[in-house]
Amino acid sequence: MNTNAILSVRNLKTRFTMDEGTTKAVDGVSFDVAPGQVVGIVGESGCGKSVTIKSILRIVQKPGEVVGGEILFRPQRHGENGTDFVDLAKLDGRGKEMRTIRGNDIALIPQEPMAALSPVHTIGNQLVEAVQLHRKINKRQAEEIAIERMKEVGVPSPEERMSAYSWELSGGLRQRVMIAMALLCSPRLLIADEPTTAIDVTTQAQVLNLLRGLQKNHDMAIIFITHDLGVIAQVADDVVVMYLGRVMETGPVDDIFHNPLHPYTKALLGSIPSIHTTSREPLPTIEGSIPHPFNRPAGCPFFPRCAAYMPGKCDRQTPKLERIGEHQSVSCFLHHEVAEEI
Amino acid sequence: MSLANSSDDKVTLLEVKGLSKFFPIKKGVLRRIQGQVRAVDDVSFRIYEGETLGLVGESGCGKTTTSRCIMRALDPTDGEILFRSANGEIVDIAAMRESEIRPLRREIQMIFQDPYASLNPRMNVMDIIGESLQVIGGMSAREERSARVAELLALVGLRPEYMQRFPHAFSGGQRQRIAIARALALHPRLVVADEPVSALDVSVQAQVLNLMLKLQRELNLTYLFVAHDLSVVKHICDRVIVMYVGKIVEIAPTETLFSAPKHPYTAALMAAVPVADPRQRTAMTPLEGDVPSPANPPSGCYFHPRCRHAVEVCVKKQPALEECADGHLVRCHRAAELSLPGIGGENEAATAGS
Amino acid sequence: MSAETESKTENIEVRQAGQREDADAISVAPNWKLVWWRFRKHRLALVAGVLLFFIILIAGFPGFFSTQDPSQSDTTGSFMPPQGIHIWDDGPAFFAYAANGARNPRTLRMEWQLDESQKVPLRLFGRGYEWKVLGLFTTDIHLIGLVNPDEDKPIHLLGTDRLGRDQWSRLMYGTQVSLSVGLLAVFISTVLGIFLGGISGYFGGLADMVIQRVVELLQSIPPIPIWLALSAALPRTWSVTTSYLAITGILALLTWTTLAREVRGRFLALREEDFVVAAKLAGCRQLRIVFRHMVPTMNSHIIAAVTLAIPVMIINETFLSFLGLGLRPPAISWGVLLQEAQNLQSVALAPWLLLPGVAVIITVLVLNVLGDGLRDAADPYH
């Protein structure tokens, strides 16, 4: 474990128990987040990236449940370099301690700002309420902080926007307001859940630049969830590649993009058309489709679609996430022999 | 009526002339019409036989409305949509009654964005794909239909045995293949694809794009490809139309458009696409501000409030769509003087590490 | 596709298929099967379904379940308390205690005592009075009958009313009437609701305007006074059947509006659905789009809505009849039966006259639980 990390997720397991069966939405996920670092979690639908961050925030809804692992987080009030981690997995999701950490130490930027903002309260009301929830200050001071933050995220004429309603703003502005709200209490860790999926590409570029700037100025760590490899390449320092609830590969962004080790990462990178690649030629593809969560394959979750599948091995044992080289870790029998114990 | 062909003798399959679609804005208790959303505003272009024409733009630019008007899923407010049907006759789709269009539906088909919404969950694959065969294809015998459906399934890479299955048994990519098979059932000549891969997972997108390319070669299809993802458009299209707030701002062959865009919006759009390579991080924001509402567009050139190159004339006068090179049309007052950055073609190697 | 890639695809399919042996049944399952599989998990609703089946059985063959002719009165047998059935008497048995009554000379009321020394032996599928099976042929077989019908006095499982009529048998026949009024009224209002709601939602425009205004008008009328007025206007001279149909019509005419609104809303939403647009682009005509694509999508929702509407109808009928404005004797319905319990004195003396109320409660609960289960299962593709 990175001793410097502010968040260290160890072997996290989250399950959904339903009548139809149990889904291992997150199945032994581990990664670290260092202060001031942007960690990108990338994966396709059903890979468990959203459930992972919901587990970290402890907002997984029933019938989902965190059933194992540790979520070690270093909140602000503990010493900057101390080793006193709090294991979020052991806290009560609705308890006072977790509620203080949420919003104060860890903030979330949701995917759909329209759904996250109330349509019947003004932007100002919502921002002021969020400030006062965590800090004992009067309304005027709270308003000042809110306007300050809106200025910082590039909302034009923030004083006027205070009295606007969410539906009066454009998609890009709404997302900026959400970012301002997340920054209100100067969190140490910002979690962005596909923050640019619902907005247009020119606005996306603005939001990505904004997030990068904020991260630098505030020395804030960011966990960035997306399915877009382009976005990951543009913002992340470290990348976690997930597939069906498991981490396939993790490492520095440059290694992931220029020296991918896992067949899934390789195939994924190969299959995206880029504005730089040759047109009109068949793209390399990953055959088959993502299985339904109830039909998770035994062994390595990727083996049925894998080009380098080794019969008798990949379908029997699940490879463990093992460090290969200095920074990169990969869970694939092509690179090591360590299997998950059952 | 006649259709003009291009200078190098490509056959025009469809010509859109001055197409407009306005949606009234009703307000107040009396629901009086207060204004209009000019979703598509005086749009003209041609689709040549056998090509893939891309239609790109951000949300609200009118690309989807344009495609729906061509399909007559929406009734256009104004304009002509001339189509050269298989028997050589040229018809104006915009002026036809629903009953007149029905036989034409064999020749123009559509692929929808969301394969979860576009397949009726209560019908099995056989009935979904076979429906048009039955209602306008004249195949009333079930055996005949099921033979054709089996053929179509094989064509899109699915097993014919899947015919009895219902859509819920399939993944997103497989559903999109079913939707493609449905579109191809009656040997259409024009396929309008409305963001056919944007609802799919990354690993599946490539499969569907490859399939579309393969089918185009084998069946000599013409595609109108509506998309917002420039990488996909660059990969699959021969020519591209860029739309902004209901109007066409640029039309050009794909290579030209990407290497030497003439409209500042096109250039900004391309610069905004995040490159999947951490070594090529873009530091600056390509565009400030947001897309204006088509209900209340700015004066002059709709793009001037966000344009770095805007001058006085841009605020006052709306530029016309003019040809600046063969087959390259642009709507910008300063198109001739500006030199905008494009994206280098093949020299910047693929970023993927495999 | 080259042979190599084809075999590769095959491989992947085999590898992926290995993961889902049981998925094949689901793959080819039509909508109703999926709804049933989901509904099956709702235990309470399943129990309600079984109960409803028995209630419907009673409604279909009330004669079989009754023990007496429901309209046969016996002045010497009034206000007899429930006799009850006993199935244990130092060993399995099936009998009832005889009831002996005598008139109190002061109050002139019948006073009853169960005589535990005198057992009336019973049997299943015994013979009794003659009844008609679905109006087709006659039989005298009943679920419960006397072993010696010629010697023993008839038994009254739930006692008798003021005129000495058998409460149990009347309840059985009341079930038939009350349930069928509910079903018929809901059927009429469903047809009206779907038809008018469908026109309103699919065609829009002027038709929609007119229908919606009518719906608003009907919904703004307070239902109780209008029912009272309409029922009071029915001529007293009408036969039982005619007034039965008239009441049904009155109930239906005022309740189709809710369903019409629901259907309209669904049509409006469905019209924009991609698969409906796709059907249009596939060349389907309007009628086919409506009946092949849109209506089936609403089926299960309509069934759920209808199931939830029946209990409301039953309550309405009971309520009208209880007030003496619905069905009138000699018709037998739950409301008519409860009318007997209007008199405070008779309730005090013969509380078993309230038992039809229990039947109402059970039936309404059963239908509501069932409707809830159906509503939850109605949309299996989430």
Image (cartoon, coloured by chain):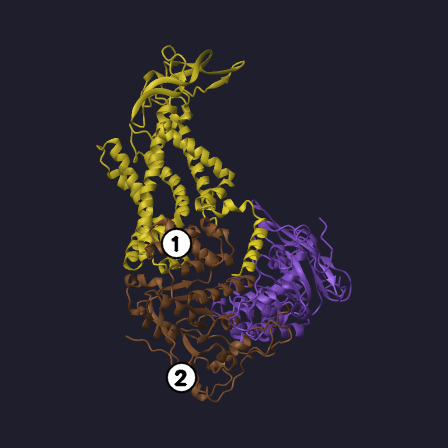
Q: Secondary structure at mark 1?
A: helix
Q: Badge 2, how many Cα within 10 Å: few under 14, some, many 20+?
A: some
Colour that chain C carries in the picture: yellow
> Type of residue at label 2?
Glu
**Is A115 placed left or right of B324 in the picture?**
right
View extreme (front): residue: C3
Question: What distance separates the C-alpha of mark 2 from that of mark 1?
Answer: 45 Å
Which residue is tagged 2?
B322
Q: Chain of mark 1?
A: B
Looking at the colours in the rendered structure, which chain would you say is drawn in purple?
A
Residue C276 screen position, x and y as percent: 38, 57
**Is C194 placed left or right of C364 in the picture?**
left
Residue occupying image coordinates x 30% and y 24%: C137
Residue C143 screen position, x and y as percent: 40, 22
Colour that chain B carries in the picture: brown
Which residue is tagged 1?
B130
Q: Secondary structure at mark 2?
A: strand
- Quarter assignment of residue C179: top left
